[in-house]
Image: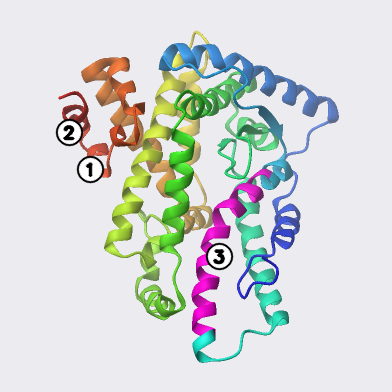
Amino acid sequence: MSDSMISIDWDFARASAQRLAGSGPKVSSSEAAAAVADLRAAAAAAHAPVAETSRMESPAGSAPVLIVDRGGWTEANLGSMRALMDPVLDKIQSSMAAKVGKSGPAPIPAIAGIGGKIAGAEMGALLAFLAGKVLGQYDLAPQGRPRLLLVAPNIVHAEREMEVDPHDFRRWVAMHEETHRVQFTAVPWLRDHMITTTRDLAVDLAPTPGELAERMTQLAKQLPGAFKEGSSGLAEVFMTPEQKARVADVTAIMSLLEGHADVVMDDVGPDVIPSVAWIREKFTQRRAGLNQVDKIVRRILGLEAKMRQYADGAVFVRAVVAKVGIDGFNAVWTSPETLPTAAEMADPAAWVARVHG
């Protein structure tokens, strides 16, 4: 979209992210090779216990496992983010073109190019921040083939910081991400549903030029709320009540996925990961012990809300399993209509009553 009135310079975003993310903890070449081999083995070993515990089976070879550094994670997510953002930019560009056609000449290309670089720098900074935090990810890859990513330097940094058993911690992380891989490969419709739902919501949230002034006024009034504990992030400031309801339902699905992965990861138990209880305790302490600046950044970006998804989703999963068993819970994967709503996430019995009668 280099000739657009509004664009993101993705090459500049890539360069900015690579420059800002850093390489991670210092390790020797032999330590790095050993960590990569151990993570690869951990990912392979996670498949059987996840399938047994979740009672979900995914087709063999359905998504590759990639052990990446921060640059590799950035590269993968640039492609995915661009695939999601392009329709958003198209909407804004079309709205601006219509407005320009009525009110005057189009922007000067050089100025539009500067704007693209500014947007690219901002996107690069966001990706760099995340690239230093993410341990693993199941990348839905809207533009291509999905893959499971394990970010080796961040995992090594976390295990050193928490002083946990590296072998067990790597299996614990791999177990969580393998559960996501199974969710999206054992349930054929889920990936397209999530991509379409997320993309449509992003397009709906994008302001037209006519809405922008009103939203900037809202931002001035409500910005302090984005910094408060319990905030869902800066984007919430701009939402209408209808949009907030749609976001709540998308958040419910994400909470389900994250909570289910957390439950499976913990239920696999000490037979596979001997120090699982200690890892969970240390990891919870690590989440709670972030410095104030980190907490504020996470709050603005909505990452603090993501942490709440783990807890909310796990409560829902455990409540449903206690009532109807794991096979009864797995009815959640039948179709988009059987996914829990935001209200049902807070009231698991309501979901059971709707789906099981």
The residue wearing badge 3 is 89
Write down the region rendered in magenta: 76-100
- Local secondary structure at mark 2: helix
Amino acid type, residue under disc 2 in the picture: Ala
Instruction: Give how far apart the Cα atoms at labels 2 and 1 are.
Output: 8 Å
In the foreground, 95 or 198: 95
Q: Specify few, some or many for label 3: CA neighbours under 10 Å numbering under 14, 14-19, or 20 or more.
A: many
Residue in the image at 36% along x and 74% along y: 218
Q: Residue 78 colored magenta?
A: yes
Kindly identify which numbered label has been placed on residue 350.
2
Furthest residue toward top: 271
Quadrant position of the N terminus in the picture: bottom right
Instruction: Give how far apart the Cα atoms at labels 3 and 2 are.
Output: 39 Å
User: Which-is-in-front pick, marks 3 and 1?
Assistant: 3
- Local secondary structure at mark 3: helix
Residue in the image at 35% along x and 64% along y: 239
